[in-house]
Image (cartoon, rainbow, N blue to C red):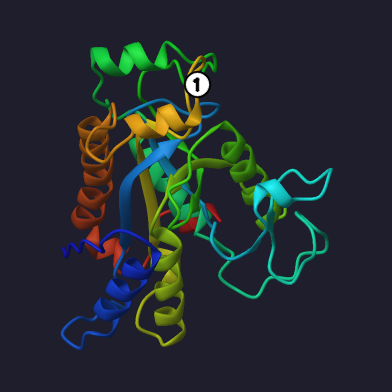
Amino acid sequence: MLAICTGVGIARAAASIMALGLDPRFDLRKAYWLVAGIAGIDPADGSLGSAAWAEWVVDGDLAHEIDAREIPPGWKTGFVPLRRTMPYEQPRKPIGGEAYHLNAALTNWAFELTRKVELADNPEMRKERSQFRELNARRPPFVLKGDQLASSTFWHGKLLNQWANDWVRYQTDGQANYVTTAMEDSGTLQSLTFLAKAGRVALDRVMVLRTASDFDQQRPGMTAAESLAQNQSQHYTAYYPALEAAWRVGNVVVSALTAGWEKFRDHTPGADHH
């Protein structure tokens, strides 16, 4: 087993993973990749301390942008896809890197293996989630499947949550549902995609797990700015429980792959369910 801390942001993640993938000391052609980190979560889909396995990773930085104070009447956002002239214009004209579709069978295998893992909870988390109206937000921490929006801009608030849902839906032609934020994983996936084309890694052996340290928006009765001010690094309500959740859930998968290596070296889990 090998662990790497990429650093914060898409650029650092891309550089770190590319450096690892090109290091001649390692043969990574049969390697499985478990990409894990903490995240903000959409209260419509999950609660603090929950763990989400992503099938889709969508980039939230590749775009044109007009300041919200200057957008035309009728536009929902100032974010415009590259090579397009208005938000969510059809048909899409992707240039590559807007969205990454992971191995759905492997993702589902990891989810089924971990869906009953018990996750940490505490009184502070219970108090915060009780202030949200959404049913999933009010649940104790749980394991789910949910897709990710990765951007180096740490965005926050109900209105940008709506943008995140719309953007993920648009960039995947309606196949993905935004659940968690991230700041690295599209960079990691871009490097792994290039490395796969060079024959150095197997792209169908990548899993992405994000655990919820905070909600991606303010609770009722609070402004987005007030909520963001409370969400400083390591002061998230579920910061340590989210770290613990990443280990509890991720460790089950890593242990299964290690114990079953004779089989999994040449046969990817879930392949028989394609």
Question: Amino acid under label 1?
Answer: Asn
Q: Residue at x 20, y 88 (%)?
A: 24
Kindly indicate the quadrant of the structure image that contains residue 200. Answer: bottom left
Q: Can the viewer see residue 121 in this picture?
A: yes
Q: In the rendered view, tell whether residue 242 sits above or below residue 75.
A: above
Work out which residue is located at the far front of the displayed protein and give it.
69
Q: Residue at x 44, y 12 (%)?
A: 131
Q: Nearer the viewer, residue 102 or 150?
A: 150
Where the C terminus falls, by quadrant?
Answer: bottom right
Position of residue 130 in the picture relative to residue 173 (left or right): left
Q: Can the viewer see residue 30 in this picture?
A: no
Where the N terminus falls, by quadrant?
Answer: bottom left
Position of residue 84 in the picture relative to residue 25 (left or right): right
Q: In the rendered view, tell whether residue 183 sits above or below residue 218.
A: below
Q: Nearer the viewer, residue 244 or 229?
A: 229
Kindly indicate the quadrant of the structure image that contains residue 11. Answer: bottom left
- What secondary structure is found at the residue carrying circle 1? loop
User: Disc 1 designates what residue?
Assistant: 136
Q: Position of residue 172 (x, y in %)?
A: 66, 56
